Image (cartoon, rainbow, N blue to C red):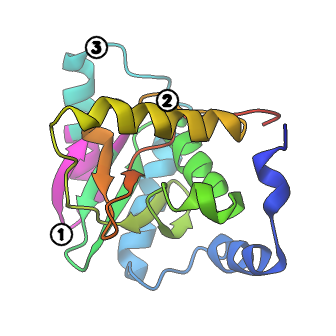
Amino acid sequence: MENIYDHQDEENNKRKNEIDSLKSSYLSKQENKSINSWILKIKNKSNIKDSKEMNAHVKKAIKALQLKYTIIGNGKNRIVFDLENGYVLKVALNNWGMKSNKKEYKLFFNSPSHIRKHLCPVIESGYGWIIMKKMTQKIPSDKEYDKKISQLIKIFKENGIEPKDIKEKNLALSENGDFIVIDYGNFIVTGD
């Protein structure tokens, strides 16, 4: 079985170097500074244990980040903001959130096209944050859903990817009708 990360090319390396500079085309210097400050505060934060702790931590994040964007979701590890320009910003809430952002970046930019077409596009990434395309078209709730999701899982597994946490709220449809995974930070890659 071929390792998914063997598909890295020169263009991806160039993009990675640009991203690693922490400059953003979508975030202001102040927003970037605010996020970096937050990330330094939570650098050694362990995983959230219960919903009460999660709610308190999310409120703390919102206050510390002071971002002007609407929050469209959050989990135990990341908070998602709508940048209102066709993109979303995912900011880590803890170390696992940091790993999830890195995983999405690495997986998207190192996957072959037949896998990448099922992953929500990554636009930019920085220390503790990632910007992705906003996918709004939800998958239909019909009998074909189970069949298509099984096929998608099979495609990932055949390419050395264990697709953890695939569920309806983490999926959307592309313009072409393909299933797109919008949260793949928990995927496990063989040899990773």
Q: What amino acid type should be assigned to the residue bearing mark 1?
A: Lys
Choose the circle earlier in sequence order: 1 or 3. Answer: 3
**Pointer 3 residue:** 50
Q: Which of the 4 image quadrants contains residue 58? A: top left
Q: What amino acid type should be assigned to the residue bearing mark 2?
A: Lys
Query: At numbered mark 3, what does the secondary structure look like: helix, strand or loop?
Result: loop
Where does the N terminus fall, quadrant-wise? top right
Q: Which residues are magenta?
A: 59-78
**Pointer 2 residue:** 45
Choose the circle earlier in sequence order: 1 or 2. Answer: 2
Please report the residue visible at 33 percent of the width from the left and 64 percent of the height from the top. Answer: 174
| In the foreground, 82 or 49 | 82
Residue 78 place in picture, x, y as percent: 37, 42
Choose the circle earlier in sequence order: 3 or 2. Answer: 2
As drawn, is 143 to the left or to the right of 44? Answer: left
Tell me the distance, in whole angstroms, between the alpha carbons under discs 3 and 2.
14 Å
Residue 85 place in picture, x, y as percent: 24, 80
As drawn, is 78 to the left or to the right of 3? Answer: left
Residue 135 place in picture, x, y as percent: 28, 62
As drawn, is 34 to the left or to the right of 123? Answer: left
Tell me the distance, in whole angstroms, between the alpha carbons under discs 1 and 2.
24 Å
Query: At numbered mark 2, what does the secondary structure look like: helix, strand or loop?
Result: loop
**Pointer 1 residue:** 68
